[in-house]
Amino acid sequence: MNTNPHFQDADAFYEQLLDAHTGLGREDSELLNARLILLLANQIGDAGVLKACIDAARDMPATPG
């Protein structure tokens, strides 16, 4: 699992993500996130890497710092 920053343009991605949620209610926003997670997981494909990512995400603090 790669934990080093690997974005070509993190700010642009964040803006695209925010824009994708514009006008959505909470339920539709959560569905968008779920679909995006599944699409990105499909791009990774490796079950071991996906498990490591899930574990790492659970262990991350809720807020930075």
Image (cartoon, rainbow, N blue to C red):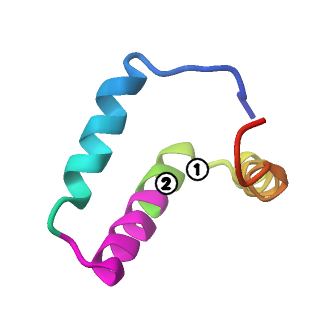
The magenta region covers 24-37
**Location of the C terminus (image quadrant):** top right
Name the mark on residue 15: none
Judged from the image, the secondary structure of the residue bearing numbered disc 1 is loop
Outermost top residue: 8
Residue at image x 21%, y 71%?
24
The x, y position of residue 34, in whole percent, is: 44, 69
Residue at image x 27%, y 37%?
15
Q: Is residue 39 left or right of residue 20?
A: right
Going by the numbered disc 2, the residue's amino acid type is: Asn
Residue 42, placed above or below residue 29:
above
Residue at image x 73%, y 57%?
54
Number of residues whose C-alpha sits closer than 10 Å to that of mark 2, classed few (under 14), some (14–19) or many (20 or more): few
Residue at image x 77%, y 56%?
51
Residue linked to disc 2: 42
Q: Nearer the viewer, residue 16 or 26?
A: 26
Going by the numbered disc 1, the residue's amino acid type is: Gly
Q: Quadrant of residue 16?
A: top left
Q: Quadrant of residue 27?
A: bottom left
Residue 24, placed above or below residue 11:
below
Residue 57, placed above or below residue 34:
above
Name the mark on residue 45: 1
Q: Magenta span has 33?
A: yes
The x, y position of residue 6, in whole percent, is: 55, 20
Do residues under tags 2 and 1 come within 8 Å of each other at their CB atoms? yes
Report, in whole angstroms, how far the alpha carbon at label 2 lies from the one at label 1.
5 Å
The x, y position of residue 1, in whole percent, is: 75, 34
- Counting the numbered discs, the total is 2
Number of residues whose C-alpha sits closer than 10 Å to that of mark 1, classed few (under 14), some (14–19) or many (20 or more): few
Q: Nearer the viewer, residue 5 or 46?
A: 5
Judged from the image, the secondary structure of the residue bearing numbered disc 2 is helix
Residue 5, placed above or below residue 48:
above
